[in-house]
Amino acid sequence: MEKEKIYIDPEKFALRFISSFNFEFNPKELEVMAKKELAAYLSAYFLVEKFNKIEGENFDRTQPNNLSDLGFDDLLAHVTDLNKY
């Protein structure tokens, strides 16, 4: 079985993410609502970009076949590296 690289479209994900929220319309707080929606959109967008970058780096990396062969420090570094996003 070949390993397939995962790619998530950041714009589609971010738009889908903010569409899942119910931002109640209040004309008096329109700017505050817009800022919340923008913050949600940008957070989702940049999270997916980070994921795609890390997935790309890990996909192309040659790793040992058996992680149990790694020493504790190497294994800890490997797990820390995988948990960046």
Image: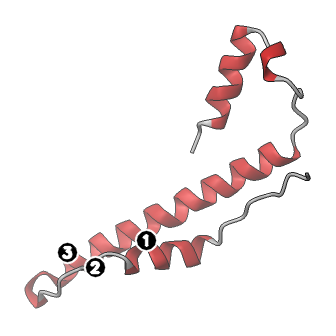
* Pointer 3 with pointer 1, Cβ within 8 A: no
Quarter of the figure with the C terminus:
top right
> In the figure, 41 relative to 23: above or below?
above
Q: Position of residue 42 (x, y in %)?
A: 45, 67
Residue at x 91%, y 53% (from the top left corner): 2
| Amino acid type assigned to the residue bearing label 2 in the image | Ala
Mark-to-mark CA distance, 2 and 3: 5 Å
In this picture, residue 18 sits left or right of residue 25? right
Residue at x 70%, y 11% (from the top left corner): 73
Q: Nearer the viewer, mark 1 or mark 2?
A: 1
| Amino acid type assigned to the residue bearing label 1 in the image | Tyr
Q: Secondary structure at mark 1?
A: helix
| Amino acid type assigned to the residue bearing label 3 in the image | Val
**Residue 34: which disc?**
2
Q: Nearer the viewer, mark 3 or mark 1?
A: 1
In this picture, residue 31 sits left or right of residue 3? left
In terms of sequence position, does the residue under pointer 1 or pointer 2 come before the other? 2
The residue indicated by pointer 1 is: 41
Mark 1 surroundings: few (<14), some (14-19) or many (≥20) residues within 10 A: many
Q: Secondary structure at mark 3?
A: helix
| Between 35 and 48, the one nearer to me in the picture | 48
Q: Identify the image quadrant of residue 82.
A: top right
**Residue 32: which disc?**
3
Q: Secondary structure at mark 2?
A: helix
> In the figure, 9 relative to 83: above or below?
below
